[in-house]
Image: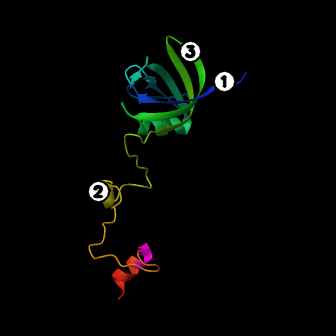
Amino acid sequence: MAPSVTHVTGIVAGDVEVRFTQDGTAVCRFRVTETPTQWDAATQRWRDLEPIPYICTAWRTLARNTTESLVDGVSVLVKGRITAIKDDSIYLSVDDLGISLRRRIAYTETSLPGPLATRPVAPPLVPQPATAPRQTTGRAGSPTTWWEEKRASHWP
C-alpha cells in the first residue's frame, strides 16, 4: 500500500533542526501546528477546533532550503506523505514546502525588493466624474461614450 499524501497549512512551531547523515545528506525536522476552524451557526462566528500537531522531516536540498528559510511562527503549506501517527502527532515525510503568502510577502534571491516594494499597495483610483457639462452624441439625450469623452479632453 502506498503512503497517504496530504496537504497541510499551518504555523511552524519552534526552530528547524538540521543534521547530516554519515555520507553528508542533510535532514531537517520541524513542527507545524494546524488549527482547523468550523462555522458555528448559533453564534454566527468561526471557532477554532483542537490544534493538530505535525512533525515534518525533509531531506537533501529541501532540508537545506527549509533550514535557511523557516523560523518559528511562519505560515507554511506542506505536501507530504504520512509515515506514522503516534503520541498525538502526525509524522510527515515532506515532498514540497512553501511559505504562505496570506499574511506576509516572500522574496527570493532573484526577486529582491526594489524601491517600489516599500510603497503600500493601494486599490486602483476610481475615475472622477467630469466637471464640465456632458455633451451628447447620436440621438438627443444619449450620453457620450467613454472614448468620446477621452478624445474630447485631449483633442479640440
First in sequence, mark 1 or 3: give its number.
1
Circle 2 packing at 10 Å, graded few (<14), some (14-19), many (20+), is few
Q: Nearer the viewer, residue 45 or 35?
A: 45
Say which amino acid is labelled 2. Answer: Arg
Nearer to me, 2 or 20: 2
Q: Secondary structure at mark 2?
A: loop
Q: Which mark is residue 119?
A: 2
Q: Residue at x 46, y 78 (%)?
A: 139
Q: Position of residue 22 (x, y in %)?
A: 55, 28
Q: CA distance from mark 3 to mark 2?
A: 46 Å
| Residue toward you, 86 or 43 | 43
Tag of residue 85? 3
Residue drawn at point x = 34 percent, y = 59 percent: 114
How far is disc 2 from disc 1 in space, using C-alphas?
46 Å
Give yes or no for residue 80 being in the magenta stretch.
no
The answer to whether 146 is drawn above or below residue 43 in the figure is below
Residue type at mark 3: give it: Ile
Q: Quadrant of residue 6?
A: top right
Q: Which residues are magenta?
A: 142-148
Q: Is residue 130 left or right of residue 32?
A: left
